[in-house]
């Protein structure tokens, strides 16, 4: 995370990106990193609850 933060700041410092671009990218990445496993866990729980009982 430290490397990503420093890279984002360097992109702003070099005027390659706006600060809002780097903040939006960080929020998007964090949202995907946290949301995707939560979604998969919820789907697994739902699918496991609907499975028929084993004979």
Image (cartoon, rainbow, N blue to C red):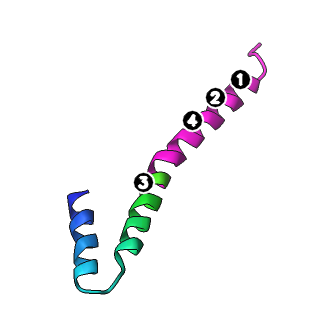
Up-down relation of residue 29 to residue 53 (above or below): below
CA distance for labels 1 and 4: 12 Å
**Residue at numbered disc 1:** 49
**Residue at numbered disc 4:** 41
CA distance for labels 1 and 2: 6 Å
Q: Which residue is drawn at 57% across and 35% down?
A: 41
Q: Which residue is drawn at 38% across and 66% down?
A: 23
Label 2, secondary structure: give it: helix
Query: Sequence-wise, which precedes: disc 1 or disc 4?
Result: 4
**Residue at numbered disc 3:** 30
Q: How crowded is mark 2: few (under 14 residues within 10 Å), some or many (20 or more)?
A: few
In this view, the residue in front, 50 or 55, is 50
Within the image, what quadrant is residue 17 found in? bottom left
Q: At which x and y percent is residue 10? A: 22, 77
Q: At which x and y percent is residue 1? A: 26, 56
**Residue at numbered disc 2:** 45
Q: Residues within 10 Å of mark 4 (few under 14, many from 20)?
A: few
Up-down relation of residue 51 to residue 41 (above or below): above
Label 4, secondary structure: give it: helix
Q: At which x and y percent is residue 21? A: 41, 74
Query: Sequence-wise, which precedes: disc 4 or disc 3?
Result: 3
Segment tinted magenta in the rendering: 32-55
Within the image, what quadrant is residue 25 found in? bottom left
Magenta region's main secondary structure?
A: helix
Q: How crowded is mark 3: few (under 14 residues within 10 Å), some or many (20 or more)?
A: few
Q: In this view, does 11 lie to the left or right of 46?
A: left
Mark 2 and mark 1 in contact (Cβ < 8 Å)? yes
Q: Which of marks 2 and 3 is in front?
A: 3
């Amino acid at each position: 995370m430290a490397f990503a933060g420093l890279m984002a700041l360097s992109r702003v410092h070099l005027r390659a990106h706006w600060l809002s671009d780097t903040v939006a990218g960080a929020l998007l990445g964090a949202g995907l990193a946290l949301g995707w496993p939560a979604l998969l866990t919820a789907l697994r729980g739902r699918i496991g609850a609907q499975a028929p009982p084993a004979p």
